[in-house]
Amino acid sequence: MVKITDVARHAGVSPSTVSYALSGKRPISEETRQRVEASIRELGYRPHAGARALASSRSNVVALVVPLRSGIHVPVAMQFAVSVVTTARGHDHDVLLLTQEEGDEGLRRVADTALVDALIVMDVQLRDPRLPLLRSLDRPSVMIGFPLEPGGPTCVDLDFRAAGELCVERLAGLGHRVVALVGSPPEVYVRETAFAERVVQGFTAAADRNGLASSVHPCEATPAAARRIAEQMLRGQPALTGVVVHNEAVLEPLIDAFERLGLRVPGDLSVTAICPDELAESLRVPVTSVALPSAELGALAVELLMKKLDGTSVPEATLLPPRLTDRASTRPRDVP
C-alpha cells in the first residue's frame, strides 16, 4: 500500500507538504502542489479516511438513512442507494448505509461521532420523529421526502400528489368514470409515510374534481393479496374501468388477477401506475406510468448536500414534476 511518505519521497517534498496539498490547510506553491498531485496519480495513492479526517476535519463520508421497514419495496430503495453512492463517489465521498429501524437513535449515534459529514434521510413520514434531531444537528442534511412541516433539512422528492392527479386525469380524459387506487401495503399508511399519503390525496382530489366514482385499496405486496384486492374492487365497483397502481410488487400480479376474472387490459380495464420506467416497460402489457425518478432524486440529494457542505445556499424544497408515458395498458372507455 502506498503511504504518504512514499508520495513525499517521489515528489521531493516533506510528508507535511503532501498533507497540506491534500487538505489545503496551509498555502503551498502551485508548482509544488502540481508535483505532489502528479506523484499521487503516478503512485496511485489514496489517503486513509482517518488521516483525511484529521487533516481536514472531515470524514468525506455521507450517511444514507434508509430504514428497511415492513412494506418498503427494497428494489426501489436500492435504486436510490445506488444513485447516492455513485454520485457521492464523484465528489470523493463514501456512503455509510443505515438500514435498521431505529427512529432518531441511529441518527444520534452517528451524529455523536465524527463518522459522517452529512446525512441523507429516506422513507420520510408526515410526522417524522427524526425531524427534531435533524434540525438540531450541526451537520447538513437532505430528506428525500416531505414531512408536513419541513423547516430545517432541505427536502427533495417527486411531486407525488401531482403524480396521483396525473394518473386520474389521464383516465378521465379517456372517458373512464369509475376508478380505483391500489396503494402501498397497509403498514405504510399506518406510519403516515409521506409519499404514499400524497398519492392518495392527489388521486382523490382529481377523482372528485372530475366527478368520478373512486375508491382506495391498500394492498400487501404479494400475488395472493393482489388477487383478493382485484376481487374486492370488482364486487364493490362492478362498473370499474380504470385503475391506478402505486405498489410495484403487485403491478404484474394485479393485471394477471383481473384477466383471470375476465377483464382484459386494456380492452376492459385501463391501468396506470407510479413506478420505475423499466418496470412499466418490461411487463407483458407495458403499463402507462408516471416515472419514479430514483436516480435523479438520489443524485440531486447528493449535489445539494455537497453545496451545503461547501457553505453554498440551496433551495429548501425541490419537487420534481411528474412525467407520464402512455403505453399499451390504457385506451378510451367503450361507451355502450
Image: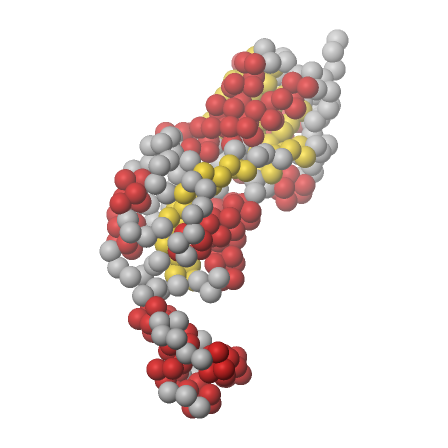
Asked where in the image residue 149 lies, by quadrant, the reply is top left
Above or below — where is 223 with respect to 81? above
Asked where in the image residue 166 lies, by quadrant, the reply is top right
Give the percent coordinates (x, y) of residue 172. 65, 18
Above or below — where is 2 with respect to 169? below
Point 73% across, 20% down: residue: 332
Give the percent coordinates (x, y) of residue 82. 51, 54
Above or below — where is 74 with respect to 28? above
Point 44% across, 85% down: residue: 7
Point 45% across, 46% down: residue: 314
Q: Quadrant of the N terminus?
A: bottom left
Q: Is residue 227 visible?
A: no
Above or below — where is 19 with respect to 111? below
Give the percent coordinates (x, y) of residue 171. 65, 21
Q: Is residue 138 visible?
A: yes
Name the foreground residue: 284 vs 335: 335
Point 46% across, 50% down: residue: 304
